[in-house]
Amino acid sequence: MNEQEFLARMAEIARDGAARAGRGLTGLIGEEVVIRIPEVRLGAQRDICNAVGGDDTVVLGAYLNVEGDVTAHVMLLFPTSKALACVDMMCGQPLGTASESDELVLSAIGELGNVVGSAFVNALADAANLSLHPSPPTVVHDLAMALVDTVYAELLVQDGPVLLLDTVFEDARGETTGLLIVAPDPATVAHLQELAA
Amino acid sequence: MSATALCSRVSVGIGQIAESDDPDTVLVAYGLGSCVAVALWLPTARWAALAHILLPNSGGAPFDPLEPARYADHGVRELAERAARRGRLSDLVVKLAGGAAVLGNSHNQRFKVGDRNAEAIYEELRRLGLTVAAADVGGTQGRTLELYVADGRTFVRTAAAAAREL
């Protein structure tokens, strides 16, 4: 399987994950959520920072570490203002109510990451017939670049190719825009290539 | 308008090194997570350099001029070579920032990339006889480091805190 075929296969899995995540979020929020996948790429960590607003953007989101037959990193990131708007929607409260110092907000973001991240992990598990176990979500509130550089370093420390799937998703009113990153580690990429061949 | 506003900011990306003797330039390493920035200032030449180091050790991998600071050992040696062309290494002021566990300490137990980056940099600096004047490393918060070429001042800021001088 060449690189192009592999990326096409991963895009297919990502689309399935996006559909599941959309259904999960729709159920959670009570409004239709649309998830788009503009591109599946190798590397390109800088593009992820740009997608959430640039080098200096502070993001709020959730991180899941996936263990099992293979391992992967999953992160759902929002620019802080978008995260707060999303929590207001989830809680059915007026926009501008949620505050980043509120424990409930952090908990809601963690749950959001759990729903969306798990949808992708399940799509990956089903497509490749794998047993995968996502960790409980870790809520992250930091510089986008710092989060991306850490995942990137951990993948590279294993001395292999890096695959990053980035996904922009929005609700029906376009009020919640976030970014989902699914980064299987290099051993996982090789395993998936074998399975998909 | 302040003097700072007139400065041109040069972003030093992951694995890269930038140097300058232009007093109107600020070298910046944005969003350091487990990465560590090594900032050099040579007052005798009013010269500054900044490396954005990604990983601890090259393990014998060849030096890549397109990514000179991918590894701590390569990056620090390259910085020292560039500094030696400008003056004496003993005059260098060395500062570090980064090496955080931004995904939480429990997650960090797996690879400890941030800790290992900082350790590898300290070790390489020691080998070259260089000491660190100031450092802000470790913890769980990402950082952005700015190095002012005009006077060698460095500032670190996080998502939660405004810039403070290092």
Image: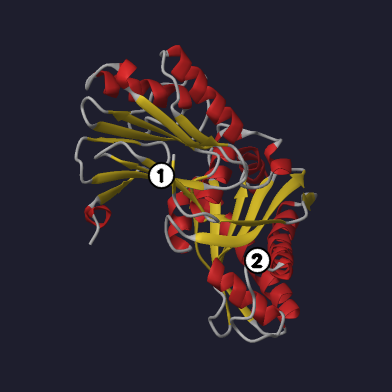
- How crowded is the residue under tag 1: few (<14 C-alpha within 10 Å), some, or many (20+)? some
Residue A169 appears in the figure: no
- Dots 2 and 1: beta carbons under 8 Å? no
Examine the rendered structure and indicate whether residue B108 appears above or below residue B122. below
Residue B11 appears in the figure: yes
Compare residues A114 and A85 and report the one nearer the observer: A85
Image quadrant in which you'd find residue B155: top left
- For residue B81, side relative to residue A82 (left or right): left
The structure residue drawn at horizontal position 65% and vertical position 66%, both measured from the top left corner, is A101
Compare residues B71 and B144 and report the one nearer the observer: B144
Q: Position of residue A142 (x, y in %)?
A: 56, 55
The structure residue drawn at horizontal position 58% and vertical position 84%, both measured from the top left corner, is A172
Q: Which residue is mark 1?
A: B155
Compare residues A87 and B159 and report the one nearer the observer: B159
Q: Quadrant of the N terminus of chain A?
A: top right
Q: Position of residue A176 (x, y in %)?
A: 57, 76
Q: Which residue is mark 2?
A: A101
Identify the subunit bearing mark 2: A
